Image (cartoon, coloured by chain):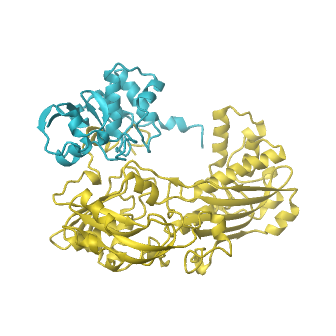
Amino acid sequence: MKLTVNGVDTPIESGPLTSLLDVLREELGVTSPKAGCEQGGCGACTVLVDGEPRRSCLTPVASIDGAAVTTVEGLGSPEDMAPIQQAFTHHYAAQCGFCTSGMMLAAQAYIDHGGSDDHEAIQEALGGHVCRCTGYVKIVDAIAAAVRGESFDLTVTAPGAAMTNLGGVR
Amino acid sequence: MKAVGARVPRYDGVAHVTGHTVFVDDIRIPGTLWVKAFRSPVYNAVMTNLDTSKAEAMQGVHVITWEDVPLLEYGHLSALGIPADEPLLAKDEVRYLGQPIAIVAAPSEEAAMAAVAAITADFDERPALFDVRKAFAADAPQIHVEGNWYAHFEDEMDRRQIRKGNIEEAFDKADLIVQGVYRPAAIEHAPIETQVCQVVPEANGRLTIYSCTQALYFSMGVVAAHLQVPLNKLKVVGGTVGGGFGGKVDTATETMCALLAQKSGKPVKWRWTREEEFLCSSTRAPWHMEIADAVTKDGWILGRRMLTLHDAGAYSRFSPYGLTKHSFHHTGAYSIPNLEFDGYVVYTNRTPTSAMRGFGVTSVSFATETHMSRIALELGIDPYELRLKNANRIGDTSPNQIVYTDPSTVPTILAIADAVGHDLTPEYRAMTPDQRSGSLLPEHLVGQLGNPEAH
């Protein structure tokens, strides 16, 4: 068997029924897909298989022999981040970071398929992904901003603006 | 102070979105053994005939039981001199479903599961208690030798007690007694990263512990105590937590992995399944709270009697600490001068409960705020005005006699009224947190005032 992982042709030695999650994490050392539940419930293991989001924990590797697999490592690097990565950073959509990889890949597929910045549509597309930190608002905001093609300032801004909002409350 | 009011990117944000953050499960150490647990299949039983011999005979398998633990009982509150009530591994009794009994390390996850399946024990089941009210009753079956009430509050009291003012007089003067019972349920933290730990035995005799703990120094002390080794034998690496919310304050995995690393001489890793996370990790406690307030027709709360039962589950862990915080907050954000509070940490056969966000306080806030609305409803008073009237002000004292120097109740309630468009009369709209005087200092509140300057 072989896979193209983040653009690199890679022979696979694991058994045919090994989950794609275990192949990526244990055989190949690609650790961004997470083992959150290993039963398809949380979305933290999601990767793109030929551009479509898939639960890697429920995907026997033999069933996708020859496919192209994309993880967040394949979206962009710290020096050259993809728009969805910049959006997640700018909007604080990654808190503990554990669900982030799956969230971003589902979001990337949503954007690639021409999704809109409508919040309900984004919620529907990301419905299978569980986050326990953010309450989802920042994640949806980040995806909507990425859909709109906004540019993001990831540097420290000047102090002052946030404080004025507290003026009315002692 | 450059960061105050500025927009500052998360220090770990870029690593999170590019897959560079290394969580405990992402650490790669060749030759690492997988760890799995043999857990109690019943809620309450005497255990006999624990037999791990078949598992130990398997190729490359290592097993620990209670016999391998140098100090079997130790807890996070032990450092404060409070007796521990929970064995690291069950010895001859089990008190909750999923309680760890024997832990195995094996060359693969499958081999570890096979080893667990080869372990046997006999369980002579006893009645299990799941309702904190039933466990609290004097004639309930006893879950621990000492009984069902945790018995080690200050001066070895079996309850957390607060007395303030003259409660009898307050109830004598009341126009109305308003009562309520509040019972929030248990909540599982459900972090997306389950409990996980890796321990590496180093050539210099130390153990390196990679932990998802939220409380690294707690864990370090707990591991050192169980193992009976000095702290300098442990190097604990933490700081990256895939969600915790209090569920990673207890030391769930580190000690057992450390013992297995010692015994096997090999690196070990234990990653709980989602099922284990739900069934076996600590939860937020279920609470039972009964409130009776002595109130006047015009909306003053003269006194409060309160009974709280905190469901500890099978072992106390941090529950006494949670109940103490609970007791200090049992008037909520309001000044009630006469108090009679009795709180108990009660054992049941549920999974042990422990820390979770706002530990001990969310329960009492739910109860007290619901009760405030109930009082307003019964008196026919605007619930915002009832709250503003009784709100903590500068110089008021808390249940445990702390003098408030900058209470935020009044501005918070005014902000909420603004946010939801609730109309207030000019008298209430103009309120501030300043010290009580005039109509806001009725006779019953005079005696409870403290001097904020002294703090």
Determine whether B285 is above or below B89 in the image.
above
In the figure, the shade used to draw chain A is cyan
Q: Residue at x 88, y 56 (%)?
A: B175
Determine whether A36 is above or below B186 in the image.
above
Picture coordinates of residue B45, whole percent (x, y):
50, 73
Residue A67 appears in which quarter of the rendering?
top left
In the figure, the shade used to draw chain B is yellow
Q: Is residue A156 visible?
A: no
Q: Which quadrant holds the N terminus of chain A?
A: top left
Residue B217 appears in which quarter of the rendering?
bottom left
Count the marks: how many? Answer: 0
Q: Is residue B140 left or right of residue B62?
A: right
Determine whether B47 is above or below B403 in the image.
below
Q: Is residue B262 left or right of residue B388?
A: left
Q: Is residue A62 left or right of residue B36?
A: left
Foreground residue among A30 and B412: A30
Picture coordinates of residue B366, whole percent (x, y):
64, 51
Picture coordinates of residue B300, whole percent (x, y):
80, 53
Q: Which quadrant holds the C terminus of chain A?
A: top right
Q: Residue at x 23, y 73 (%)?
A: B263
Residue B341 appears in which quarter of the rendering?
bottom right
Foreground residue among B393 and A95: A95
Foreground residue among B394 and B200: B200
Q: Is residue B443 visible?
A: yes
Determine whether A73 is above or below B352 in the image.
above
